[in-house]
Amino acid sequence: MAESKIPYKINLSENEIPKAWHNVRADMKTAHRPMLHPGTLQPVTPDDLRPVFCDRLVAQELNDKDRFIEIPGPVLDFYRMYRPSPLVRAYFLEKALDTPARIYYKYEGGNTSGSHKLNSAIAQAYYAKEQGLKGVTTETGAGQWGTALSMACGYFGLDCRVYMVKVSSEQKPYRKAVMETYGATVTPSPSGTTQIGRKMLADDPDTTGSLGCAISEAVEAAVSTEGYRYVLGSVLNQVLLHQSIVGLEAKAALEKYGESPDILIGCAGGGSNLGGLMAPFMGDRLAGRKAPRFIAVEPASCPSMTRGRFAYDFCDTGKVTPLAKMYTLGSAFIPASNHAGGLRYHGMSPILSQLYHDGYLDEARAVGQLGVFEAAKLFAKVEGLLPAPESAHAIRVAIDEALKCRESGEAKTILFGLTGTGYFDMAAYMQHNDGTMEDYVPTDADLARGFAGLPEVAAE
Ligand SMILES: *Cc1c(COP(=O)(O)O)cnc(C)c1O
């Protein structure tokens, strides 16, 4: 390795942090379908969205014209505290796999929140502050988004109210503690603090909660509290926009060494890290230039792209949010608790959904939990970095693709997103260590229950 031309870490300098985000919607051939108002089922207007989201984010959400959107100075300043994030050549993984493939990963787990979610949290908190709001509400599943948002709100002096899926708040007390340390209020969901939460509890007092339900509570709390707006950590167009910083940095770093990926891999929960990593590369594809093969990886337990429907659906269980056209398992689908908490969402980013539907996002692949943890542990041993279970979905497929190269002798270049650290997921690693972890795959009958709840929308 010492004599290799390409270093283990390709570092960009601070001045090379991109100054603008890449809005992939401006590149897309098919405009994705408009969001629909939950009451009227008509396309939403900016006025419909402004009670929920702050004004500048509404504009970003609906913007399909501007390819580049300038990053505000205070957001760039914050980015400088933890970016550029490292782009690493996984020499030791390549060696362990005895593959001719060249493997790179972009590591987003090096900040205190432990994941890429901080990239959007800081932007969303900034726009809320700029508008003079008092605070924001949100939900968190595994806890990463709530942690990132609490850091961002702590920095800008905004109040932060987090509805945390009940099962996660019980399993991850340290996540909760970090959020509270940064000044956030954390409420396990469903809770008695909202109408929707009280209804959920009345219907099923033992419910462990779901992301969709926590979203409903957070939206209700935002629209019924003066000076508050709701923010979301994935799925939305604005979040993919902010996450494009990941792809822009990765592309700039690779280009320094004349590298361009043949395969680009990301785990997909709501689609934000993959959407961000692939944005500039997808721009190339949509403009007819050379581009990688894109692979989205999801858990077999929550297979929205591989087994879901491309349909209009609510983004939450309580049906208070606008409807989006996306790959979905139905907003009533509650995935079995598994350890890739950040990947347990019933739907998928409308941008990724449309690109997948149109064949630009080449493949979605569902992987089982046991195989994911085997990949995670191999990676931890040879690359010296303990990955988040979510990220390990991408590692699994990167390894599988590299093993194919070993068979074929092709020296492909593989780039994947390593979205986070595994430090807060030791309960999952403990289960894998003691052999009690299982692979869970929903049956067709399980999925049919989710599909039965899909709204009927005439205007498809
Ligand atoms: C939230 C999260 C994900 C999944 O979310 P996306 O919006 O699909 O990127 C993946 N990895 C980590 C570490 C996360 O926290």
Image (cartoon, helix red, strand yellow):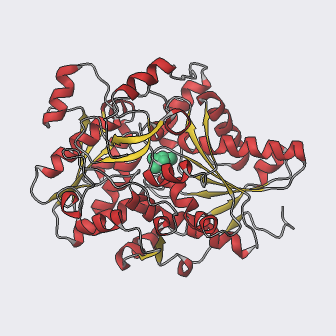
Residue 425 spot, x, y in % from top left: 49, 37
Residue 286 spot, x, y in % from top left: 60, 65
Quarter of image, res 297: top right
Quarter of image, res 394: top right
Residue 314 spot, x, y in % from top left: 31, 41
- Do we see residue 92 in this rendering? yes
**Picture residue at 47% right of the left edge, 78% below the top:** 19
**Picture residue at 68% right of the left edge, 37% below the top:** 375
- Do we see residue 109 in this rendering? no
> Eyeballing the image, is 402 above or below 165?
below
Viewer-proximal residue among 234 and 389: 234
Residue found at the far front of this picture = 458
**Picture residue at 86% right of the left edge, 45% below the top:** 406
Viewer-proximal residue among 28 and 171: 28
- Lateral position of residue 276 relative to residue 366, left or right: left
Residue 219 spot, x, y in % from top left: 21, 47
- Lateral position of residue 248 relative to residue 62, left or right: right
Viewer-proximal residue among 67 and 55: 67
Quarter of image, res 190: top left
> Eyeballing the image, is 244 above or below 274?
below
